[in-house]
Image (cartoon, rainbow, N blue to C red):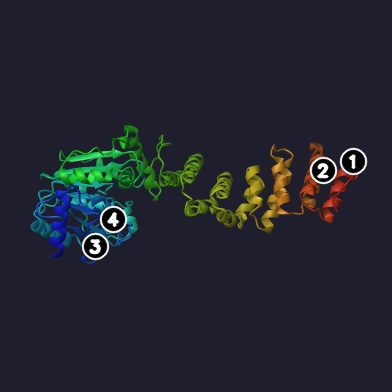
Amino acid sequence: MLALFHSLRARVLKSLGRLPARLPEHVADLGDNTLRRERFLGNGKPMLVIFGPADLDYNRPIYRGLLAPIDCNYVIFQSRSMDFFFRDWSAILAHIRALSALWTPQRTVCWGFSMGGYASIRLGLDESQSIACAVAISPHFRLNAPVSRAQQEKQLPEDVDFPDLVDALNRHDGTTRFKIYIPTHSIRDSIHVLDAQEVHSPSVEIHYLNVDHGIEIKWKEDGSLRSAFDSLASDRPWNHAGRYTSSPRDISNAMTAVDYFRQSFGEDRPLSAMTDEDVMEAKWHSTKAIAHRAHKDWDGFFDSASRSLQLGAARNGFPTIYSSIFFDTGTPDRAAASILAWTLRYDIQATRDLLNSPRATEIVHSHMAFDDLCYLLMFAGEEQASCTAREILFRCDKEPSADLGVFAIGAAGLHMADAIERLAHRAAANNVHAAADAFFGKLASMRQPSTSDREAWQRTRAAIGLPPPSSIPK
């Protein structure tokens, strides 16, 4: 009776030229691992079957707002895990058949994003269903690939045969049309770009888009996702956001990136250069960095790792893999120095963690840029602060930003009289006495000098034939 009430209500509102802003969904479990959300407006209307992606709140009513004004019945399947709907697949197929018999749709279409894209293709290939069109966004094709996210997440059921969708699509001779959208700016999807090159069925349209994995999210943001659902349900043409269409270079880069992706998992792969400055995915560039490191290409590592950090790789904390590379004895000192300098920009806690290591002492002594040393001083523990400050002083006379070093030591409140004196007596020929004298003067203006500061300043001036300073703050 409740379904009949909502159906009659929808018909009245439809006759007035509008659908209700939000009709209630019927929500229930299906099988052991799946939730279904359904909305019924009336018999004979198009039926839209949607498979949700993984990594969503199981209780979140996804798509309901987008589908509210669309004149169709729908059922949405959400999984409690990243199992690609395998655990309850038989129950899902049986439920769709039952809805088809009950709702008598004029046409049935399906849609899926990410994990749901794989399920959407499977449903379109199922001979027991009558699917007019199956749309898959960022889908997998082959779940058996060891580097695929499906395998890495380890949530697939055991003892199950995973259909190879490339072969299945090429064998397909039914009436279902397939529209598949694959991102070319996503390193994890690069293997799917390569797989898609093997699909040659005339019933399959493949569109490559120059975005990352979240194609559906971008369509929602730019307002085109609702029109996509409306066009799919009503069998009208839909412009698939043409401004995202990949160039031949984008597609070529994605296929080249497969070797970087596999190398990052330990496979020995050749790495080819590519022009990918326009790829805005942090994961893409951090994966390339890991691959370059495996090949001991440290210039490539520097370029890719720094690009990944610029794009947000440290948004949830400095990448653990970069910290591990810092501690690895096989990492050259200059590469380790770059990693330590990056922590100053992206994660101060990581700076402190890296500084509390024997490796940091080596790096501070010879490989850090002067400006980075000065900033490093503010976060160093007592032992490293002393080491860092001495290195700053030893370099100050040659650095155009020497004042920054004096400021850093003054701000840190360190008593560096002994270090300044040693600096002066080590390098008298380079006129460092005069520089040391100037440093003492600047430090004295920034904080109260200690007794040792005042005595060392007088000894330094005597070493270059100058009288004691006329005024030393007491």
Question: Which disc number belongs to residue 62?
Answer: 4
Tag 4 and tag 2, C-beta contact below 8 Å: no
Q: Which residue is mark 2?
A: 437
In three-dimensional space, the C-alpha distance between marks 2 and 1, rounded to whole angstroms, equals 10 Å
Q: Pick whichever of labels 3 and 4 is earlier in the sequence.
A: 3
- Disc 4 and disc 2: Cα gap in Å? 69 Å
Q: Position of residue 2 (x, y in %)?
A: 15, 64
> Left or right: 284 with respect to 334?
left
Question: Contact (CB < 8 A) between labels 2 and 1?
Answer: yes
Identify which residue is drawn at 28% across, 46% down: 138
Which residue matches tag 1? 466
133 and 168: which one is in front? 133
Q: Report crowding for label 2: few under 14, some 14 to 19, many 20 or more residues within 10 A (C-alpha).
A: many
Residue 118 as seen in the image, left or right of residue 175: right
Disc 2 residue type (three-letter):
Asp
Which residue shows up at 72% across the image and 38% down it?
398
Name the image quarter holding the C terminus: bottom right
Marks 3/4: CA–CA distance: 12 Å
* Residue located at (37% from left, 46% from top): 261
Helix, strand, or loop for circle 3?
A: strand
Which tag is nearer the camera, tag 1 or tag 4?
A: 4
Residue situated in front as seen by the camera: 88 or 109: 109
Q: Quadrant of residue 354?
A: bottom right
In this rendering, does residue 296 appear at all?
no
In-image side of 417 versus 308 (left or right): right
Residue type, numbered disc 1: Leu
Circle count = 4
Q: Which residue is mark 3?
A: 35
Q: Residue type at mark 3?
A: Leu
Q: Is residue 104 above or below residue 132?
A: below
Which label's residue is closer to the chain start, 3 or 1? 3
Q: Earlier in the sequence, mark 1 or mark 4?
A: 4
